[in-house]
Image: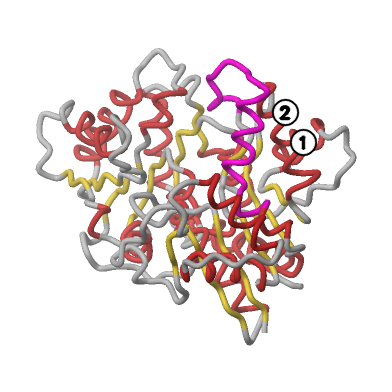
Amino acid sequence: MIKLFFCNVVTENNFGSPCLMHGAEEIIKKLHKNYEIICYQYTKPNDFFISDFGFPIKQVPYNNKLSMLWGGIKYKLGIKPRNKLQLDFLEHIKTSDIVVDLYGILFCSKLSKDKFSYIKTIKSVLRDNLIIIIAKMFKTKTVKTPASYGPIKHKKDIITAKIAARYLFDKIYAREIKSKEQIQKVLNNRLNIPVAPDLANYMATKGSEKHGKHIGISVSYQIIRQWQSKESYILCVANLIKYILSATKHNVVLYPNEVHTKNNYNDNHVCLDITKQLNDSKRVEIVNIEKLNSTELKALIINSEVFISSRYHSCIAALSAGIPVIVIGWHHKYNELFKLYGQEKWVISNNNCTSDNLIRHFSNLYENRDAERNVINEKRKKIHEALLAAGQVLFTK
């Protein structure tokens, strides 16, 4: 029996975390006959969004992280909390064989906009890694599953990467060669960082008949923040949809991925802004992901004839099921993911995307979709082998 503790994910209103959790469980199933998984997240789990998981998902039972740290220190000293939920939480960390951090992108200076402060940096390390820190108190094995790192240029990210790699994790994996190079440069090559594909590539799902065969487009508010092309992202996607509706018989389904209400502008808003650019949107539908769990959403995605995406885990959902994909990307993680599947020619950068280029790529892929599907399915075998090899390191005592 092996006991694993998942952390640093959230199951509501996003697609990435659930995909990682499903992929991890499928790998663990392959490696162990007897296992136990428990997952804790900082938000209250929604019964609907966790309905497709085979293990319990609970809320961290502390109102603030300082009290959680203090609770962990006292428990280490033999002082048990009176609150049963807090006691169970700490006991799960202590008795687990492995605490698994599943978060997908770290130390990315493209996302670090604040002015550097050493005190704020240390506080953020404590805040973002508190469960891992408590696990280290109890000498529980801690692992960082394959993630994207960098570009690591901001001083905050340099310091955070050094602390995480040297002191927080017993094993840390990268999901791209460039991510490995980024973090090893920061560490002056003092630590070997293995590379393995994203765990979500192992998530298993069957297709859905809902919506029929369609052209799927997964949008992203994040890419708009990074956009550098002269022609706007909204206009590029809207013009592509106009072309699809005129050149094919397929309907278009827009997929928001991240719809957190705390964001003033999320993927739902992007979908609405795109449809406003269309003269006729009768054949265009926006998926309500608040009414789909992650298994249902992937099932819908893989019913696409061709998929266009600006979201990493939507790309994985499609590619891992043999669906040809065009990605409009802003980070090196997209290039290496598509290279794994032999699909690097279908990557378009946010730096130079235009409607004409996007339409040309779609036309070529649509025409050659059967041949590309064969390539994707052949490459998937090696990806699964690599994930099982990584799992032997990450998910064994």
Q: Is residue 370 visible?
A: no
51 or 64, nearer to the observer: 64
User: 278 left or right of 204?
Assistant: left
Q: Position of residue 19 (x, y in %)?
A: 47, 59
Q: Which residues are magenta?
A: 109-133
Query: Is residue 200 magenta-colored?
Result: no
Identify which residue is drawn at 86% across, 44% down. Answer: 191
For residue 109, above or below residue 321: above
What is the quadrant of the C terminus in the image? Answer: bottom right
Q: Position of residue 373 (x, y in %)?
A: 48, 57
Q: Is residue 119 visible?
A: yes
Question: Which residue is label 1 attached to?
Answer: 162
63 or 341, nearer to the observer: 63
User: 103 left or right of 365?
Assistant: right
* Mark 1 and mark 2 residues within 8 Å of each other at the beta carbon: yes
Q: Position of residue 343 (x, y in %)?
A: 56, 46
Query: Is residue 125 magenta-colored?
Result: yes
Q: What amino acid does circle 1 point to?
A: Lys
What is the quadrant of the N terminus in the image? Answer: bottom right
Q: What amino acid does circle 2 point to?
A: Ile
Question: Which residue is label 2 attached to?
Answer: 158
- Marks 1/2: CA–CA distance: 6 Å
Q: Residue furthest top?
A: 230
Identify which residue is drawn at 72% across, 64% down. Answer: 394
| Prevailing secondary structure class for the magenta stretch in the rendered image | helix
Q: Secondary structure at mark 1?
A: helix
